[in-house]
Image: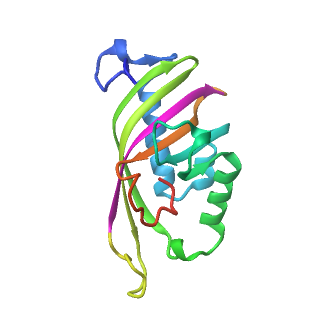
Amino acid sequence: MSNMHHATNTPSLADAAGVTRAEIENLLYHEANLLDDLQLDDWLQLFTPDGLYWVPIDEHAPVASQGAIIFDPTLRREERVYHLLHTSFPAQSPRSRTIHLVSNVVFAPRGADIAVRCNQVIHEMRMGDFAQRGIGEITPVIARVDYLLRPAEGRLLIAEKKVLLINRDTWQGNLTYIL
């Protein structure tokens, strides 16, 4: 993603498709807070009607041509949120606690949309009893996240969120929470 705007105080770098750096960063921070606070129904509202949330194994393969760690178009994303909030299953019993840290935000217009790249470190932990493996351990998940944001209805919406785990081609632990 060349020609991306890097974090700076230079006013000339403030706009991409008529949207300010602050608006872009505020959306990313808002999303992180919603995920950390388990406000997942509100998180769903951040996406366009055809939005995609995915965690690919091969970042260069076309979306439809590969398996993925997570591949959630709208219906699957809604199903994931429903299960996390309303059903009990071992991988999220007890539920994960997360802290999302967002940094190194860069962006560039892509037609009417805005391509955004950032780094994220997600710290995850589940409380529980001694019988569950990994309980009480804080696990860092490190990723580059590529967003495609779309101005719509007077606000920015997520048309695509692609999470590129640095260890995406190796064994993954419990990723049943939302990255």
Residue 111, how many percent across, how many down?
A: 56, 17
Q: Nearer the viewer, residue 46 or 148?
A: 148
Give the answer, above or below, for where 21 lies relative to 74. Answer: above
Q: Residue at x 50, y 75 (%)?
A: 94
Q: For residue 49, which quarter of the picture?
A: top right
Q: Is residue 140 located in the magenta-colored stretch of the structure?
A: yes
Q: Nearer the viewer, residue 154 or 83?
A: 83
Residue 64, how many percent across, how many down?
A: 62, 40
Residue 53, how many percent across, how many down?
A: 57, 45
Task: Decide if residue 63 is on the left or right side of residue 100.
Answer: right
Magenta highlight range: 138-152
For the N terminus, the image quarter is: top left
Q: For residue 117, which quarter of the picture?
A: top left
Q: Nearer the viewer, residue 40 or 121?
A: 121
Q: Nearer the viewer, residue 71 or 36?
A: 71
Q: For residue 73, which quarter of the picture?
A: top right
Query: Residue pushed farthest top?
Result: 12
